[in-house]
Image (cartoon, rainbow, N blue to C red):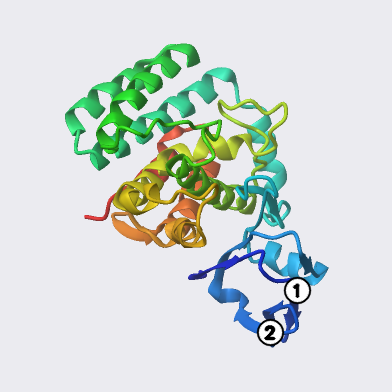
Amino acid sequence: MGWRSLYLSNKHHLTLSIDNQRISIQKDNQLPAHFRVEDINFILIDSYDFNVSGRVLEVLAKHNIPLVLTSSKDHMPCLQLANPYSSHHRIGRIVTAQSKMTQKEKLTFWKKIISYKIQTQGLLINEKEQSEVMKEQALKAKSTASLLGVEGSWAKYYWKRLVDNENFNRIPKVYGDPNDTMNSFLNYTYAIIRARISSAISENGMLPLFSLFHRRDYNVFALSDDMIEPYRWVADKLFSENIDEISENIDSFLMIEHKKLALSILHERVFIVSKRRSFSLDEAIRIGMRGLREAILHQNDCYLEDTLCIMPQ
Protein backbone atom coordinates (compact mmCIF):
# COMPACT_ATOMS: atom_id res chain seq x y z
CA MET A 1 0.00 0.00 0.00
CA GLY A 2 1.55 3.28 -1.16
CA TRP A 3 2.00 6.24 1.14
CA ARG A 4 3.30 8.93 -1.24
CA SER A 5 1.11 11.18 -3.44
CA LEU A 6 2.99 13.01 -6.19
CA TYR A 7 2.01 16.46 -7.48
CA LEU A 8 3.87 17.51 -10.64
CA SER A 9 3.41 21.15 -11.69
CA ASN A 10 3.49 22.87 -15.09
CA LYS A 11 6.69 24.81 -14.42
CA HIS A 12 8.95 22.20 -16.04
CA HIS A 13 9.00 19.76 -18.91
CA LEU A 14 8.47 16.36 -17.31
CA THR A 15 9.61 12.93 -18.42
CA LEU A 16 8.26 9.85 -16.64
CA SER A 17 9.96 6.53 -17.28
CA ILE A 18 10.91 3.27 -15.56
CA ASP A 19 14.45 2.90 -14.24
CA ASN A 20 15.41 -0.29 -12.40
CA GLN A 21 11.83 -1.03 -11.25
CA ARG A 22 11.36 2.55 -10.04
CA ILE A 23 9.44 5.50 -11.46
CA SER A 24 11.91 8.06 -12.74
CA ILE A 25 10.72 11.68 -13.00
CA GLN A 26 12.98 14.17 -14.74
CA LYS A 27 12.32 17.92 -14.85
CA ASP A 28 13.89 19.68 -17.84
CA ASN A 29 17.56 18.67 -17.87
CA GLN A 30 17.87 18.17 -14.13
CA LEU A 31 18.91 14.89 -12.55
CA PRO A 32 15.88 12.59 -12.29
CA ALA A 33 14.18 11.73 -9.01
CA HIS A 34 13.35 8.07 -8.40
CA PHE A 35 10.40 6.63 -6.47
CA ARG A 36 9.68 3.03 -5.59
CA VAL A 37 6.43 1.95 -7.22
CA GLU A 38 5.29 0.36 -3.95
CA ASP A 39 5.55 3.75 -2.20
CA ILE A 40 3.25 5.62 -4.62
CA ASN A 41 -0.53 5.73 -4.26
CA PHE A 42 -1.46 8.65 -6.57
CA ILE A 43 0.11 10.85 -9.27
CA LEU A 44 -1.36 14.19 -10.33
CA ILE A 45 0.20 15.99 -13.31
CA ASP A 46 -0.79 19.66 -13.57
CA SER A 47 0.91 20.17 -16.92
CA TYR A 48 0.62 19.38 -20.63
CA ASP A 49 4.37 19.59 -21.22
CA PHE A 50 5.31 16.01 -20.34
CA ASN A 51 6.18 12.59 -21.75
CA VAL A 52 5.07 9.29 -20.20
CA SER A 53 6.43 5.98 -21.45
CA GLY A 54 4.13 3.06 -22.19
CA ARG A 55 6.02 1.05 -19.60
CA VAL A 56 5.05 3.60 -16.92
CA LEU A 57 1.36 3.26 -17.84
CA GLU A 58 1.67 -0.52 -17.68
CA VAL A 59 3.28 -0.45 -14.23
CA LEU A 60 0.77 2.08 -12.86
CA ALA A 61 -2.17 -0.01 -14.09
CA LYS A 62 -0.66 -3.19 -12.67
CA HIS A 63 -0.25 -1.57 -9.25
CA ASN A 64 -3.59 0.29 -9.43
CA ILE A 65 -2.00 3.74 -9.09
CA PRO A 66 -4.18 6.53 -10.51
CA LEU A 67 -2.48 8.89 -12.97
CA VAL A 68 -4.63 12.02 -13.24
CA LEU A 69 -4.24 14.99 -15.61
CA THR A 70 -5.72 18.47 -15.24
CA SER A 71 -7.64 20.72 -17.61
CA SER A 72 -5.70 23.43 -19.42
CA LYS A 73 -8.66 25.76 -18.85
CA ASP A 74 -9.15 25.69 -15.08
CA HIS A 75 -6.44 23.26 -13.92
CA MET A 76 -9.04 20.98 -12.32
CA PRO A 77 -8.46 17.19 -12.43
CA CYS A 78 -10.30 15.97 -15.54
CA LEU A 79 -8.65 12.88 -17.09
CA GLN A 80 -7.57 9.61 -15.54
CA LEU A 81 -5.22 7.12 -17.18
CA ALA A 82 -4.06 3.56 -16.53
CA ASN A 83 -7.12 1.98 -14.91
CA PRO A 84 -6.61 -1.83 -14.47
CA TYR A 85 -9.85 -2.88 -16.19
CA SER A 86 -8.94 -6.54 -16.65
CA SER A 87 -7.02 -7.18 -13.44
CA HIS A 88 -9.66 -9.23 -11.61
CA HIS A 89 -10.08 -12.95 -12.27
CA ARG A 90 -13.89 -12.73 -11.87
CA ILE A 91 -14.41 -9.73 -14.14
CA GLY A 92 -16.81 -11.56 -16.47
CA ARG A 93 -19.07 -12.68 -13.64
CA ILE A 94 -18.93 -9.31 -11.91
CA VAL A 95 -19.72 -7.21 -14.98
CA THR A 96 -22.58 -9.56 -15.88
CA ALA A 97 -24.02 -9.09 -12.39
CA GLN A 98 -23.67 -5.32 -12.77
CA SER A 99 -25.50 -5.29 -16.09
CA LYS A 100 -28.38 -7.42 -14.73
CA MET A 101 -29.17 -5.25 -11.70
CA THR A 102 -32.84 -4.22 -11.69
CA GLN A 103 -34.03 -0.68 -11.03
CA LYS A 104 -35.42 -1.86 -7.70
CA GLU A 105 -32.04 -3.27 -6.65
CA LYS A 106 -30.26 -0.11 -7.76
CA LEU A 107 -32.68 2.05 -5.73
CA THR A 108 -32.13 -0.14 -2.65
CA PHE A 109 -28.36 0.24 -2.97
CA TRP A 110 -28.62 3.97 -3.69
CA LYS A 111 -30.80 4.60 -0.64
CA LYS A 112 -28.22 2.87 1.56
CA ILE A 113 -25.39 4.93 0.05
CA ILE A 114 -27.23 8.23 0.58
CA SER A 115 -28.17 7.24 4.14
CA TYR A 116 -24.48 6.72 4.87
CA LYS A 117 -23.66 10.11 3.38
CA ILE A 118 -26.23 11.81 5.62
CA GLN A 119 -25.07 9.86 8.69
CA THR A 120 -21.39 10.73 8.27
CA GLN A 121 -22.04 14.38 7.47
CA GLY A 122 -24.32 14.59 10.52
CA LEU A 123 -21.51 13.36 12.73
CA LEU A 124 -19.16 15.92 11.18
CA ILE A 125 -21.42 18.87 12.07
CA ASN A 126 -22.42 17.32 15.41
CA GLU A 127 -26.07 17.03 14.38
CA LYS A 128 -26.60 13.32 14.96
CA GLU A 129 -30.29 13.59 15.91
CA GLN A 130 -31.32 15.54 12.80
CA SER A 131 -29.19 13.38 10.52
CA GLU A 132 -30.85 10.23 11.92
CA VAL A 133 -34.25 11.65 11.01
CA MET A 134 -33.12 12.46 7.46
CA LYS A 135 -31.33 9.13 7.17
CA GLU A 136 -34.54 7.24 7.96
CA GLN A 137 -36.43 9.33 5.42
CA ALA A 138 -33.83 8.41 2.80
CA LEU A 139 -34.14 4.69 3.57
CA LYS A 140 -37.95 4.89 3.34
CA ALA A 141 -37.98 6.76 0.02
CA LYS A 142 -40.14 5.04 -2.59
CA SER A 143 -38.48 6.54 -5.66
CA THR A 144 -35.34 8.32 -6.79
CA ALA A 145 -37.36 11.55 -7.01
CA SER A 146 -38.37 11.42 -3.35
CA LEU A 147 -34.82 10.44 -2.39
CA LEU A 148 -33.48 13.47 -4.24
CA GLY A 149 -35.89 15.62 -2.23
CA VAL A 150 -34.54 14.25 1.03
CA GLU A 151 -30.95 14.69 -0.12
CA GLY A 152 -31.57 18.28 -1.23
CA SER A 153 -33.20 19.23 2.07
CA TRP A 154 -30.33 17.72 4.00
CA ALA A 155 -27.72 19.49 1.85
CA LYS A 156 -29.19 22.92 2.68
CA TYR A 157 -29.21 22.09 6.38
CA TYR A 158 -25.70 20.62 6.28
CA TRP A 159 -23.81 23.35 4.42
CA LYS A 160 -25.38 26.11 6.49
CA ARG A 161 -23.96 24.51 9.63
CA LEU A 162 -20.63 23.35 8.27
CA VAL A 163 -19.50 26.67 6.78
CA ASP A 164 -19.80 29.83 8.86
CA ASN A 165 -18.98 32.18 6.01
CA GLU A 166 -21.55 34.51 4.45
CA ASN A 167 -19.62 34.60 1.16
CA PHE A 168 -19.91 30.84 0.65
CA ASN A 169 -22.57 29.26 -1.55
CA ARG A 170 -22.02 25.64 -2.52
CA ILE A 171 -21.92 25.24 -6.32
CA PRO A 172 -21.27 21.54 -7.03
CA LYS A 173 -21.46 21.55 -10.85
CA VAL A 174 -20.52 25.03 -12.04
CA TYR A 175 -17.37 26.72 -10.84
CA GLY A 176 -18.98 30.06 -9.85
CA ASP A 177 -16.79 33.15 -9.93
CA PRO A 178 -13.13 32.80 -10.96
CA ASN A 179 -12.10 33.86 -7.45
CA ASP A 180 -14.36 31.33 -5.71
CA THR A 181 -11.49 29.30 -4.34
CA MET A 182 -13.66 27.69 -1.66
CA ASN A 183 -15.78 25.82 -4.21
CA SER A 184 -12.71 25.18 -6.35
CA PHE A 185 -10.95 23.54 -3.41
CA LEU A 186 -13.93 21.31 -2.68
CA ASN A 187 -14.33 20.31 -6.33
CA TYR A 188 -10.59 19.67 -6.65
CA THR A 189 -10.57 17.44 -3.57
CA TYR A 190 -13.68 15.57 -4.67
CA ALA A 191 -12.03 14.94 -8.04
CA ILE A 192 -9.05 13.30 -6.34
CA ILE A 193 -11.31 11.04 -4.28
CA ARG A 194 -13.31 10.20 -7.42
CA ALA A 195 -10.13 9.19 -9.24
CA ARG A 196 -9.14 6.81 -6.44
CA ILE A 197 -12.67 5.35 -6.41
CA SER A 198 -12.52 4.81 -10.18
CA SER A 199 -9.28 2.85 -9.85
CA ALA A 200 -10.65 0.81 -6.94
CA ILE A 201 -13.81 -0.01 -8.90
CA SER A 202 -11.74 -1.27 -11.83
CA GLU A 203 -9.34 -3.11 -9.51
CA ASN A 204 -12.30 -5.09 -8.17
CA GLY A 205 -13.45 -6.16 -11.63
CA MET A 206 -16.36 -3.74 -12.00
CA LEU A 207 -16.97 -1.33 -14.85
CA PRO A 208 -17.54 2.24 -13.64
CA LEU A 209 -19.99 2.75 -16.52
CA PHE A 210 -22.70 0.65 -14.80
CA SER A 211 -24.13 3.08 -12.24
CA LEU A 212 -26.76 2.99 -9.52
CA PHE A 213 -28.12 6.50 -10.04
CA HIS A 214 -25.95 8.90 -12.04
CA ARG A 215 -26.56 9.11 -15.77
CA ARG A 216 -24.04 7.27 -17.91
CA ASP A 217 -24.89 8.56 -21.41
CA TYR A 218 -21.76 10.71 -21.50
CA ASN A 219 -20.04 9.62 -18.28
CA VAL A 220 -17.96 6.46 -18.28
CA PHE A 221 -17.31 6.94 -14.53
CA ALA A 222 -20.95 7.22 -13.45
CA LEU A 223 -20.53 4.56 -10.75
CA SER A 224 -17.63 6.57 -9.31
CA ASP A 225 -19.98 9.54 -8.97
CA ASP A 226 -22.36 7.27 -7.07
CA MET A 227 -19.77 5.85 -4.72
CA ILE A 228 -18.10 9.12 -3.77
CA GLU A 229 -21.08 10.03 -1.57
CA PRO A 230 -20.08 8.21 1.67
CA TYR A 231 -16.59 9.73 1.43
CA ARG A 232 -17.47 13.39 0.77
CA TRP A 233 -17.37 14.25 4.45
CA VAL A 234 -13.60 13.66 4.54
CA ALA A 235 -13.05 16.40 1.94
CA ASP A 236 -15.59 18.62 3.72
CA LYS A 237 -13.70 18.18 7.00
CA LEU A 238 -10.37 19.11 5.40
CA PHE A 239 -12.06 22.13 3.81
CA SER A 240 -13.68 23.36 7.03
CA GLU A 241 -10.41 23.02 8.95
CA ASN A 242 -8.57 25.21 6.41
CA ILE A 243 -11.36 27.50 5.20
CA ASP A 244 -9.82 30.73 6.49
CA GLU A 245 -6.58 30.16 4.60
CA ILE A 246 -8.38 28.96 1.46
CA SER A 247 -10.82 31.88 1.36
CA GLU A 248 -7.99 34.42 1.61
CA ASN A 249 -6.65 33.40 -1.80
CA ILE A 250 -7.65 36.03 -4.39
CA ASP A 251 -5.97 34.41 -7.40
CA SER A 252 -8.06 33.08 -10.28
CA PHE A 253 -6.98 29.51 -9.52
CA LEU A 254 -6.00 27.52 -6.49
CA MET A 255 -2.47 28.04 -5.25
CA ILE A 256 -0.08 25.10 -5.40
CA GLU A 257 -0.18 24.88 -1.61
CA HIS A 258 -3.94 24.34 -1.71
CA LYS A 259 -3.62 21.70 -4.44
CA LYS A 260 -1.07 19.83 -2.36
CA LEU A 261 -3.39 20.10 0.64
CA ALA A 262 -6.21 18.62 -1.45
CA LEU A 263 -3.96 15.79 -2.58
CA SER A 264 -3.22 14.95 1.07
CA ILE A 265 -6.86 13.85 1.45
CA LEU A 266 -5.96 10.25 0.59
CA HIS A 267 -3.80 10.06 3.72
CA GLU A 268 -6.53 11.22 6.11
CA ARG A 269 -7.45 8.61 8.73
CA VAL A 270 -11.00 7.27 8.82
CA PHE A 271 -12.69 4.59 10.92
CA ILE A 272 -14.52 1.83 9.01
CA VAL A 273 -17.39 0.82 11.26
CA SER A 274 -17.70 -2.75 9.92
CA LYS A 275 -13.95 -3.37 10.36
CA ARG A 276 -13.77 -1.66 13.78
CA ARG A 277 -10.46 0.01 13.01
CA SER A 278 -8.90 3.00 11.29
CA PHE A 279 -7.41 3.16 7.79
CA SER A 280 -6.12 5.83 5.47
CA LEU A 281 -8.86 7.10 3.16
CA ASP A 282 -6.94 5.55 0.26
CA GLU A 283 -7.18 2.06 1.78
CA ALA A 284 -10.72 2.64 3.08
CA ILE A 285 -11.92 3.34 -0.46
CA ARG A 286 -10.38 0.09 -1.73
CA ILE A 287 -12.06 -1.83 1.10
CA GLY A 288 -15.36 -0.08 0.38
CA MET A 289 -15.26 -0.95 -3.32
CA ARG A 290 -14.62 -4.60 -2.45
CA GLY A 291 -17.76 -4.40 -0.36
CA LEU A 292 -19.65 -2.93 -3.33
CA ARG A 293 -18.44 -5.81 -5.51
CA GLU A 294 -19.70 -8.38 -3.03
CA ALA A 295 -23.00 -6.55 -2.66
CA ILE A 296 -23.52 -6.73 -6.41
CA LEU A 297 -22.48 -10.37 -6.68
CA HIS A 298 -24.68 -11.48 -3.75
CA GLN A 299 -27.49 -8.98 -4.44
CA ASN A 300 -27.29 -7.97 -0.78
CA ASP A 301 -26.85 -4.36 0.36
CA CYS A 302 -25.45 -5.49 3.73
CA TYR A 303 -22.00 -5.66 2.13
CA LEU A 304 -22.21 -1.91 1.53
CA GLU A 305 -21.45 -1.46 5.24
CA ASP A 306 -17.78 -1.51 4.27
CA THR A 307 -18.30 1.92 2.66
CA LEU A 308 -19.43 3.46 5.96
CA CYS A 309 -16.48 5.28 7.51
CA ILE A 310 -16.52 7.96 10.17
CA MET A 311 -14.04 10.10 12.08
CA PRO A 312 -11.55 7.98 14.05
CA GLN A 313 -12.72 7.01 17.53
Of residues 105 and 178, the one nearer the viewer is 178
Residue at horizontal 44%, vertical 18%? 148
| Rendered view: 86 above or below 208 | below
Residue 43 occupies quadrant: bottom right
Residue at the disc numbered 1: 15
**Is 12 displayed left or right of 247 in the figure?**
right
Residue at the disc numbered 2: 32
**Is 137 displayed left or right of 229 in the figure?**
left
Q: Amino acid at mark 2?
A: Pro
| Rendered view: 117 above or below 215 | below
Question: Can you give x and y, in whole percent of width and height, for residue 160 in the image?
Answer: 28, 29
Circle 2 SS class:
loop
**Is 119 displayed left or right of 129 in the figure?**
right
Distance in Å between CA atoms under marks 1 and 2: 9 Å
Q: Amino acid at mark 1?
A: Thr
**Is 61 displayed left or right of 255 in the figure?**
right
Question: Can you give x and y, in whole percent of width and height, for residue 295 in the image?
Answer: 50, 38
Q: Are marks 1 and 2 in contact (CB under 8 Å)?
A: yes
